[in-house]
Amino acid sequence: MNFPFHDKTLDGQHILITGATGGIGYAAAKAAVSAGARVTITGRNEEKLSEVRQACGEDKVFAVKADLTKPQARDQLVEFAANEFGPITGLVNSAGVGGGDIVESLSEDDLRGTMELNYFSLVELTQSIYKSMKENGKGAIVNISSLSGLRGTHGNSAYSASKFAVVGFTQAFALEAIEHSVRVNAVCPGYVDTEMGRNAIKSKGERHGRSYEEQLELAKESIPSGRLTSPEEVANTIVYLLSDAAENIVGESVKISGGSVMR
C-alpha cells in the first residue's frame, strides 16, 4: 500500500516515534518521512532501529536506542532528538507490549510490566515533550491504544486495562493541551497484520485449543471487512492526525476495526 500524502504534508515537522521497531511504529516512520517530516525513532533493539533508519532514509531519520521505562533514557532521548532535528512538534506513542492471560493466571510481574510500558512510560515521555510544545504553542500527539482499550475481551485483562488507561489519558489530557494549541488523539486498531497481532491471534487460539490458522479464520469472520488491518492503514491515520488537516480533531479515539466496532 502506498502512503496517500504529498511530501509537504508534514513539511518542517519533527516527529518522534516510539516503538519504531514494531510493525505499526515502522510503518508510521515510513509514512511520516514520505509526508516530509524529519523523524526520530526509538526502540530497544539497536540492530532493528538501524534497519528501519536505512529503509526510511538515513538523511531524514535519527535513531536512538532507549528503554522508555527508565527516566534517564527518556530524558536523553528527548535531548538527543532535539539536538539533532530541533524541537519535537509531533509525538507518536507506539511502544507497547501485548500478551496476557486470564485473571487468575496473571503474575504481578506481568501486570506491572504491561502497565509500566503501555501506560506509565507513555505518560511520562509525553510530559517531557509537552513542555516544549506548550512553550511553542503548537504540537500534535497520537497515542496508540487498541480496540481492547474500548471494550474488554476474554483473557486480555492486563493489556485491555493498559489500553483503557491510554484512552482515558488521551481524553483528559486533550482538554488541557488544546488550550495551548497542542492536539492529543488516540488510534484504536483491532487485529493488525504485525508480529504482535499475529501473536495475539495465536495465543487466543491456544487458549481455546485451536491452531493459528483456525483462529485466524475466526478472527477474519468476526470482521465485516473480512480481513486484518495493515500497519500502513494505521500509519495513514497517524499521519492524518499529525497533520494540519486534523486541526479540530481533539481527544478522539479513532477506531480502525473493519466494521467490527460501531460505537
Image: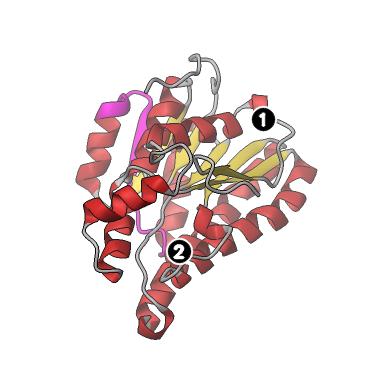
In the image, is residue 63 part of the stretch drawn in magenta? yes
Residue under label 1: 246
Q: Amino acid at mark 1?
A: Ala
Q: Is residue 128 left or right of residue 117?
A: right
Which span is picked out in magenta? 55-69
Give coordinates of residue 208: x percent, y percent: 30, 69
Residue under label 2: 71
In the image, is residue 186 part of the stretch drawn in magenta? no
Q: To which quarter of the image does residue 203 belong?
A: bottom left
Give coordinates of residue 95: x percent, y percent: 41, 52
Give coordinates of residue 187: x percent, y percent: 55, 45
Q: Is residue 210 left or right of residue 136?
A: left
Residue plotted at (36% across, 74% down): 101
- Separation of residues labelled 1 and 2 (CA atoms): 31 Å
Residue 3 in the image: above or below residue 123: above
Give coordinates of residue 11: x percent, y percent: 54, 20
| Mark closer to the observer (1, 2) | 1
| Disc 1 + disc 2, Cβ < 8 Å | no
Q: Secondary structure at mark 1?
A: helix
Question: In the picture, which quadrant includes the N terminus?
Answer: top left
In depth, the one of 201 and 238 nearer the eye is 201
